[in-house]
Image (cartoon, rainbow, N blue to C red):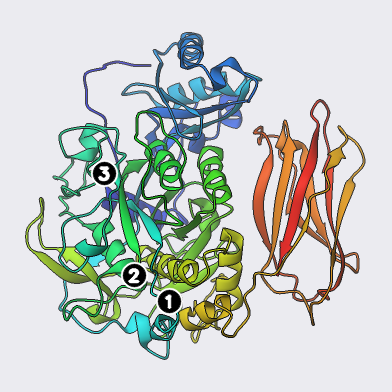
Amino acid sequence: MRTSTSLRRKLISVAAVSAALFTAATTSVAVAQDSPTQEAAVPAAQAEAAPGTPAERLIVGYKSGAAEAKSNKAAEADAAAKGAEAGEDLDFERRLGSGAALVDLGENLSRTDVADVVAEYRADPQVAYVVPDRLNKPLATPNDTEYSKQWDLFETTAGMNVPGAWDVATGSGVTVAVIDTGYVTHSDLGANIVAGYDFISDATVGNDGNGRDSNPADPGDWTAANECASGDPAYGSSWHGTHVAGTIAAVTNNGKGVAGIAYGAKVSPLRVLGKCGGYDSDIIDAITWASGGTVSGVPANANVAKVINMSLGGGGACSTATQSAINAAVNRGTTVVVAAGNSNANASGYSPASCANVISVAAADRQGNRSYYSNYGTVVDIAAPGGETNSVAANGILSTLNSGEQGPSAENYDYYQGTSMAAPHVAGLAALMKSANPALTPAQVESAIKTNSRALPGTCSGGCGAGLADAAKTVQAVSGSGGSTGGTTFTSTSAVSIPDNGSAIESPITVSGRSGNAPSALQVGVDITHTYRGDLVVDLVAPDGSTYRLKSASSSDSADNVIATYTVNASSETANGTWKLRVQDTAAQDTGRVNSWKLTF
């Protein structure tokens, strides 16, 4: 129960969370619960902002027909009622850009207290989902070094073959939103910076004396010892967002500093990470706004991004709240690139790395191996240079930075390592692609990057997606100057009703004009309306009758609709023929329909 409302919020430091994630795969946490029933009903992760830290806010999504889905007053009254049932004083804080409600729990609640509140929401049939407002962190390991060449752009072994793409495109006409720590002034980047926004709603996290505003300047994210968690040492400012932005779009051919991958593009910096990290709720609003969506209290975005880079993450699989925001961004035509994570673990246990409809990027070292820290697994889509600075600093990724230990000081350059550094390589590549071919959809961008990748020259235990991204081959492909676009799409727009708790239905697409087999990264785009998607089993059926499971039924997935793009290794299947989407409702009381679906080769 609440014991005080005067204590300031306690957040987990960026470094502490980073350390925790490196050991998450081998460490178990004993959690005290009121009873075995409570523990089964609400898993510990559903009551935590970060491993071992009880959530202080919840993100609540209501079903579309509920009054709370549209009325702030109704959501506020519902929070008060749920709090009364759980013995807590809950406050409706604001409406997120995705439509979900942000509910404040106050300070000093135990994990069990939070679980009680979560259980109240989960028991309400009008609630589509309730998830903790989790903390995220930058995914990089900084290291002081001297300036050296950018091997990651051009070296034959494990570089991304960027110079060959510049003959075709430079990123001109494309805005990339960097959702990160904001931007600190740098003369090698400033000409390519356009207006962004500070989405950090908690003034303590923001460290700039206020909450949200139109100034995305990074004041520094340094922390004093024990400031974010007991036992933490002091940490200097990371200037993480500026490093990421420089990889994407540092000014090039100006006789100084480093070259940006998409140096003709513009970067819109969006602040979501500050002291000790950043919350899902702020990140969700940044995703929404960056892609052209509306966020209450925030002016319309004049620099809508065609690419979003999120070099951040936290423990736990992708939440419904975050996934909903990503789906909406992709539906608006924005490609979302995310870091796979730095825990040497399966990326399926991290967010947003495990979200659907994103390009999840693992890190490769200078020899083309999976970097020792990089996450891996089937949710990873592609690898890109992320470097390793543990033995030789120059084997990291060099980019724009600042020398200030706390607030901004002199601009400089430095090497970092991390999937945070790998992701902007792919975001920069996506900007080059959109510059070369503005008509590309997010699914086509992802598919072309995978189709035109090359095999990792080293090893990747656990899986690094389709291989190492190749900028020249990919950009040439989408511009029509060679290679495989990976973008030929076949679509069915014939609606098919899904019977309640009935037999499976099938929707066909006939593929013709293709040679050989289907790709190893066949994109299956699905648009299904349904009032309880956890009831649904969705399969892709190949022309020879082979089936590929896209989605399984889940009693815990109570949200509406399935709007997602799945990647299928269909390389053993003949491309031409009749493919089918098979959908079955496996439980009673909810209905839906297949609106459309598509295959992108």
Q: Disc 1 vs disc 2: Cβ atoms closer than 8 Å? A: yes
Q: Secondary structure at mark 3?
A: loop
Compared to residue 363, the image places residue 255 above or below, namely below
Q: Earlier in the sequence, mark 1 or mark 2?
A: 1
- What residue lies at 24% left-to-right and 32% top-to-bottom? 211
Q: Earlier in the sequence, mark 2 or mark 3?
A: 2
Q: Label 1 belongs to which residue?
A: 169
Task: Residue type at mark 1: give it.
Answer: Ala
Q: Label 2 belongs to which residue?
A: 264
Disc 3 crowd, CA 10 A, few/some/many (<14, 14-19, 20+): many
- Residue 556 % position (x, y): 66, 35
Compared to residue 69, the image places residue 141 above or below, namely below
Disc 1 crowd, CA 10 A, few/some/many (<14, 14-19, 20+): many
Q: Quadrant of the C terminus?
A: bottom right
Picture quarter containing residue 542? bottom right
- What residue lies at 21% left-to-right and 47% top-to-bottom? 232
Residue 276, label in figure = 3
Residues 116 and 518: in front is: 518
Task: Residue type at mark 3: give it.
Answer: Cys
Disc 2 crowd, CA 10 A, few/some/many (<14, 14-19, 20+): many
Q: Quadrant of the N terminus?
A: top left
